Amino acid sequence: MDQKINSEGLIDLYRKSFRQNWDLPVFSDYGGVNYTYGEAARIINQIHVFFKEQNIQPGDKVALFGRNSSNWAISFIAVIGYRTIAVPVLPDFNPSDVHQIINHSESKLLFAADALFEKTDINEMKSLEAVINLADFSVLFSSDDKINTSWEKSFKPGVLPKIKPEGFDLVDLEEEALTVISYTSGTSGFTKGVMIPARSLYSNVVFARDYMPLKAGDKLVSFLPMAHVFGLLFEFLFPATLGCHITFLTKAPTPQIIIKAFKEVQPHLILSVPLVIEKIYKKRILPTLEKPVMKILMKIPGISSILKKKVKEKLVETFGGRFHEIVIGGAPLSKDVEVFFREIGFPFTIGYGMTECGPLISYDAWDTTQPSSAGRLVDRMEVKIDSEDPYTIVGEIMVKGTNVMLGYYKNKEATKEAIEEDGWLHTGDLGVIDENNYIFIRGRSKNMLLGPSGQNIYPEEIEAKLSNLPYVQECVVVDRQGSLVALVYAEPESVEADKLDTETLEKVMEKNRQSANKELPKYSQVGRIELVKEEFQKTPKKNIKRYLYTN
């Protein structure tokens, strides 16, 4: 395990990248504006002049509230490059959550999408001095007329001289400097503000530079929410240090929009959550594989290999055709999908992390990773399993090292619960490791259920089997008085297309239950399936908010 990182700091990576790639494209909004590194640098410089005029000090908090966009990215670099603390706010949060985050973080400034800002109540956000429009950097709100004067001096066209590469500069950060406070909506309710220091971001970026092949001019599509660390780090902060060109999907990313953007942009690296991959597999691949003729042909060795090659080619083309690999994280990938992708040699890999590690804990390249693992422990981190035998007996995954957060903002009690005195962080996830530190995740400790004889039941494993059966769009397995019940939301399009009434659909679900139970040990078999009428409520990472359905 490499415990050291280079002497150059986080901010220096951006200083060098912007200067060296001045005339290359850096940020584009899909179907919208385009910026070169030089053009983005000039806006960052203007924002810094505004901060100075507004007497913003190092350590002040600046919030960002909007969907992924070029101006969001520019604002973020401006914030951390002025030694102020970025507070990303997920666009899916409701107004009361936004008010709570702004107040709890004591943010002085807010960069916001005007449509999202209109839904909030400025009177509920007492700490704010000004709100800047992410669309055009105009002032949406000011607590003082002097702010408008500051803006005039900073943003009025022709007021500031154009800067040259050598004139672009950012303020360096110490390794332990608090850089981002990340408030995330978790599967167990509204969570705490994770304090991410510069060393954590830097360690994650350096790891990606060392192990994920990208170079200046390479392209990416950013559709994961940048207000969450997975998208923030690997679709934005890491490639921006190399001179890459990032295209942001500025609207809610449906699979159709994502696929269209992939075909046009042809990204060199793709980051995704399982939900997107599974939907593409279910809609584009599975219907072909389920045809009776295909089932027979797939069992004939010579023909099977030809068909698998064609399926792989179709999949690769769907994702743009020139990516090195797809890195999947944020939630477990369906086992059936993973097994099939490995069979056809599709270049994907599964990583594991959490906001508290900014986010990486484990990763390995698609052609060297261990099947069914979440990758190998990353550099500058240690791992241990809280069990008698970490190789065979499931226990809580605990980690320690450079990537680990400073703690939870204004919450010493929660910090103490999460991080032991000797630095070990409780992840709340259950799993085992092997002798090479590959991590195999079995579920969340808080989701684990007890079987009739004390056996550990991991609902995620049951749900993975059910989710690949006919008409199941998503499901949650819960314990009802000692019996396992699967709550299922059926695929509305398929149900409508096949004209299934409720009674017929219930019969299909009963067959699904019996089919799944054949593959499950007796103590974790599903007693019944209940149909639900609406999609399950989810976090921005698209994880189901289980706590809403377990009681």
Image (cartoon, rainbow, N blue to C red):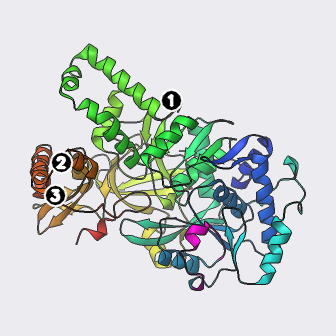
> Which one is nearer the viewer's eye here, 353 or 249?
249
Q: Nearer the viewer, mark 3 or mark 2?
A: 2
Crowd band around label 1 with a 10 angstrom C-alpha radius: few (<14), some (14–19), many (20+):
some
Q: Quadrant of residue 128 in the image?
A: bottom right
**Rendered location of residue 60, percent (x, y):** 69, 74
**Rendered location of residue 461, percent (x, y):** 24, 50
Sequence-wise, which precedes: disc 3 or disc 2?
A: 3
Relative side of 53 to 84, left or right: right
Mark 1 falls on what kind of element? Answer: loop
Mark 3 falls on what kind of element? Answer: loop
Sequence-wise, which precedes: disc 2 or disc 1?
A: 1
Residue 111: in magenta span: yes
Residue type indicated by callout 1:
Gly
Residue 463 sits above or below residue 87 on the image: above
Segment colored magenta: 108-123
Return the residue at label 3: 455
Return the residue at label 1: 321
Per the rendering, the mark at residue 499 is: 2
> Which one is nearer the viewer's eye here, 428 or 447?
447
The alpha-carbon separation of the residues under discs 2 and 1 comes to 37 Å
**Residue at the spot x=69%, y=54% of the render?**
10
Residue type indicated by callout 3:
Gln
Residue 368 sits above or below residue 201 on the image: above
**Rendered location of residue 100, percent (x, y):** 52, 79
The alpha-carbon separation of the residues under discs 3 and 1 comes to 45 Å
Residue 268 seen in render? no
Q: Are the residues tagged 2 and 1 within 8 Å (C-beta)? A: no
